[in-house]
Image (spheres, rainbow, N blue to C red):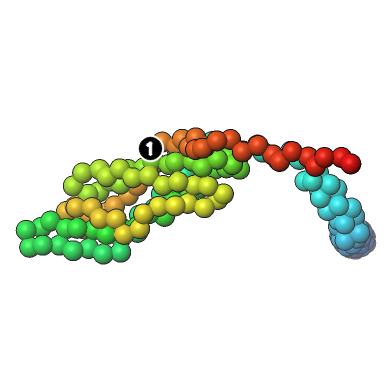
């Protein structure tokens, strides 16, 4: 029985050493994260401030989504309905918008015929008509698809900067 007792003692000592190693390793990793984590955050902050800012560009049709919110539905007994809706445009592109105004053309589907529409975007503000009507069947699900995006040319004379003041 002396051999099995010795094996049991060796196993207990090995388990105790392994347990102490795990605890010490956990404390070491925790201390590294607490103490060394601040340096890493400062390094990440330095990296993010040196990244180049994307240049503005004219977006594509894929850079916009247009939701359709139906606010009223008026159906006659013959089965024809008039839907009143407002669009909800959203820019989902990754680049900043250009400084000039852009015009987005879209098409509303789900009515009797596709209905074309446009909205403009300038300085992160969209301008569009509200409470637009379209004829359609009962229970129509109106959706919108962006068709085209163009930059609107600047109207009027070019504005030049003021001349510098005369030196005395």
Between 75 and 1, the residue placed more toward the observer is 75
Q: Please state the horizontal and vertical placement of residue 95, each as a whole percent of the image.
A: 60, 40
The secondary element bearing badge 1 is classed as strand
Rendered image quadrant of residue 84: bottom left
Does any portion of residue 49 appear in the rendered image? yes
Image quadrant occupied by the N terminus:
bottom right
Q: Please state the horizontal and vertical placement of residue 142, each as a whole percent of the image.
A: 29, 52
The residue depicted at 51 percent of the width and 42 percent of the height is: 101
What residue did someone put label 1 on? 147
Rendered image quadrant of residue 35: bottom right
> Residue most toward the front?
168
Q: Please state the horizontal and vertical placement of residue 48, each as a whole percent of the image.
A: 77, 46
Between 163 and 26, the residue placed more toward the observer is 163
The residue depicted at 32 percent of the width and 49 percent of the height is: 143
Does any portion of residue 92 appear in the rendered image? no
All told, the count of numbered labels is: 1
Q: Seen in the image, is 54 located left or right of residue 108?
A: right
Residue 73 vertical position relative to residue 127 in the rendered view, above or below: below
Residue 128 vertical position relative to residue 12 in the rendered view, above or below: above
Q: Seen in the image, is 48 located left or right of residue 130?
A: right
The residue depicted at 19 percent of the width and 52 percent of the height is: 136
The residue depicted at 25 percent of the width and 43 percent of the height is: 114
């Amino acid at each position: 029985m002396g051999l099995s007792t010795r094996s049991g003692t060796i196993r207990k000592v090995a388990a105790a050493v392994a347990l102490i190693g795990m605890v010490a390793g956990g404390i070491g990793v925790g201390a590294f994260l607490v103490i060394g984590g601040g340096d890493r955050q400062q390094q990440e902050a330095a990296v993010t401030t040196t990244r180049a800012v994307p240049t503005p560009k004219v977006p594509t049709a894929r850079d916009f989504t247009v939701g359709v919110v139906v606010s009223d539905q008026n159906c006659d007994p013959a089965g024809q309905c008039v839907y009143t809706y407002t669009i909800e445009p959203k820019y989902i592109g990754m680049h900043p918008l250009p400084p000039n105004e852009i015009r987005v053309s879209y098409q509303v589907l789900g009515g009797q015929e596709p209905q074309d529409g446009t909205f403009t975007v300038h300085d992160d503000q969209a301008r569009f008509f509200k409470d637009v009507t379209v004829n359609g069947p009962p229970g129509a699900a109106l959706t919108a698809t962006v068709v085209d995006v163009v930059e609107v040319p600047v109207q009027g004379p070019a504005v030049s900067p003021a001349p510098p003041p005369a030196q005395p």
